[in-house]
């Protein structure tokens, strides 16, 4: 378990020193920065005496930086990555620094940043900083703003950050292939002056969609419609890590979408939130409205905020139902209501492991933990506290607890027994005049109307 320290280093001190740093001060700030970066990556910092809460990237990583003469220096390496979407399914993707998606870049408004990009791919690439205000020659559109970075070359991008908010980065060369294979990442810029209300937990999520054919070792970036792996920070449920929060904390969730073709309406259970920022900047408070679902269009970021005052395990997922399904079975025929009879028995004479699936829906695929081909995962299902969770894909869980000693996954929520939906006792049914064997009201109405 990672302890949650009582006193964390002051980020305020770090950012100011990095900006002002020269000589010995730079060295000291640099060492301090790496300490803070490590602590921040582990999600350890408590919200005390600071300008901002470092961003937490579930399942993901942040790119360490060093400070050279007052400039924050990052080094991105574009390369092939063996990536696991969820236990049981891996593919060779393209990403940065060993990660899909690339590690999150984190900086502060006013920072001078220098980003080196080394290309270890077999193809040329570029770096585009999406939504980031910069000089035209740093915009990274291959052919338009620069020549592409050839395999083996290292390019340098340099700019002063003139804004704060959630931007992204991605290849802007052979876009369909390179973004499709995973070459995307988030770029978070904190405000130079803290803006109220400060948040305690600041999460960053990148959405994506993939086509990985059963048995294939690489995603198919040419796919245009039939995506079968929908991911949050590169992971499909049950591979997604929970977002862990202590009751009463103010939570920010930054969501970016660089999927090829689909916008994702991300729905959070148990809460109403406000959409506070887009990649275009902060939304004035007077223009924010309460929501439970935030649509994150392709090529956009949306940031939501709320106070976590209701403990529990709260589902957070794309509300497009095919986007909470995994790889197997999107294309199966509709068997709802079909009576297979002796079909299974007869078919097993030629296909010994045959089993008709889908006559009452897809939930059984998770419940039965059916055997699936090598390097594939069933369409639905992770195990929950009570039963199988019949969703996969773009699904994760917000875990809010009364008190925490660490931000490690706290396990399942222990709901007070009287607050859990459960089989209706006979005494309650009798008291309320409910007879489960009578026709439902809707059927009775139909009979009256159509006789
Ligand atoms: Cu979706």
Image: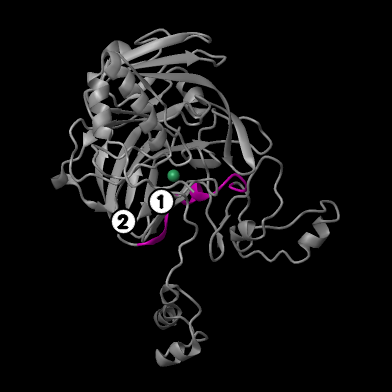
The residue that appears at 60% across and 36% down in the rendered structure is 212
Picture quarter with ligand 1? top left
| Residue 237 magenta-highlighted | no
Tell which of 226 and 105 is nearer to you: 105
Instruction: State the quadrant of the C terminus.
Output: bottom left
Give residue 244's mark: 1
Q: Is residue 220 above or below residue 333?
A: above
Q: Secondary structure at mark 2?
A: loop
Q: Residues within 10 Å of mark 1 (few under 14, many from 20)?
A: many
139 with respect to 436 (left or right): left
- Res 419 visible: yes
- Taking the spot 43% from the left edge, 15% from the top edge, the residue there is 117
Q: Judge whether residue 312 is colored magenta.
A: yes
* The quadrant where residue 404 appears: bottom left
Left or right: residue 351 compared with residue 100: right
In the rendered structure, the answer to whether residue 240 lies left or right of residue 356 reads: left
Q: Nearer the viewer, residue 150 or 156?
A: 156
| Residue 210, above or below 438 | above
Q: On residue 308, which mark appears?
A: 2
Left or right, 193 with respect to 94, comes to left
Instruction: Provide the residue span drawn in magenta.
Output: 311-330
Q: Could you say where residue 432 lies in the image, as x and y percent from the top left?
A: 40, 89
Which residue is found at the position 82% from the left and 59% from the top? 346
Q: In the picture shown, does residue 283 fall above or below 144? A: below
Residue extending farthest right: 349
């Amino acid at each position: 378990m990672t302890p949650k320290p009582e006193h964390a280093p002051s980020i305020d001190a770090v950012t100011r020193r990095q900006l002002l740093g020269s000589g010995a001060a730079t060295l000291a700030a640099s060492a301090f920065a790496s300490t803070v970066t490590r602590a921040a990556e582990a999600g350890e910092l408590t919200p005390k005496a600071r300008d901002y809460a470092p961003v937490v990237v579930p399942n993901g990583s942040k790119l360490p930086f060093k400070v050279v003469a007052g400039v924050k220096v990052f080094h991105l390496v574009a390369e092939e990555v063996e990536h696991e979407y969820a236990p049981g399914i891996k593919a060779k993707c393209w990403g940065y620094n060993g990660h899909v998606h690339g590690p999150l870049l984190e900086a502060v408004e006013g920072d001078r940043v220098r980003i080196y990009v080394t290309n270890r791919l077999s193809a040329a690439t570029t770096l585009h900083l999406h939504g980031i205000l910069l000089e035209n020659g740093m915009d990274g559109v291959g052919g338009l703003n620069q020549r592409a970075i050839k395999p083996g070359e290292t390019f340098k991008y340099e700019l002063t950050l003139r804004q704060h908010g959630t931007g992204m980065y991605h290849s802007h060369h052979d876009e369909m292939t390179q973004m499709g294979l995973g070459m995307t990442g988030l770029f978070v810029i904190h405000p130079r002056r803290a803006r109220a209300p400060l948040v305690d937990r600041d999460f960053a999520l990148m959405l994506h969609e993939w086509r990985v054919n059963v048995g294939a070792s690489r995603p198919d970036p040419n796919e245009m419609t039939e995506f079968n792996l929908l991911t949050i920070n590169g992971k499909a449920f049950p591979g997604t890590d929970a977002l862990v929060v202590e009751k009463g904390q103010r939570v920010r969730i930054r969501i970016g979408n660089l999927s090829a073709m689909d916008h994702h309406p991300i729905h959070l259970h148990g809460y109403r939130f406000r959409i506070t920022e887009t990649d275009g900047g902060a939304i004035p408070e007077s223009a924010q409205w309460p929501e439970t679902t935030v649509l994150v269009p392709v090529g956009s970021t949306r940031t939501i905020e709320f106070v976590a005052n209701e403990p529990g395990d709260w589902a957070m997922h794309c509300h497009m139902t095919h986007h909470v399904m995994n790889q197997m079975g999107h294309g199966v025929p509709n068997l709802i209501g079909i009576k297979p009879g002796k079909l299974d028995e007869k078919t097993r004479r030629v296909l010994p492991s045959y089993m008709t699936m889908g006559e009452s829906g897809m939930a059984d695929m998770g419940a039965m933990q059916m055997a699936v081909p090598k390097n594939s995962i069933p369409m639905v299902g992770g195990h929950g506290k009570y039963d199988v969770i019949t969703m996969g894909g773009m699904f994760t869980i917000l875990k809010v607890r009364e008190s925490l000693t660490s931000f490690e996954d706290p396990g399942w929520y222990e709901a007070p027994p009287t607050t859990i939906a459960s089989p209706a006792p006979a005494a309650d049914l009798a008291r309320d005049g409910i007879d489960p064997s009578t026709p439902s009201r809707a059927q009775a109405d139909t009979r009256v109307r159509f006789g």
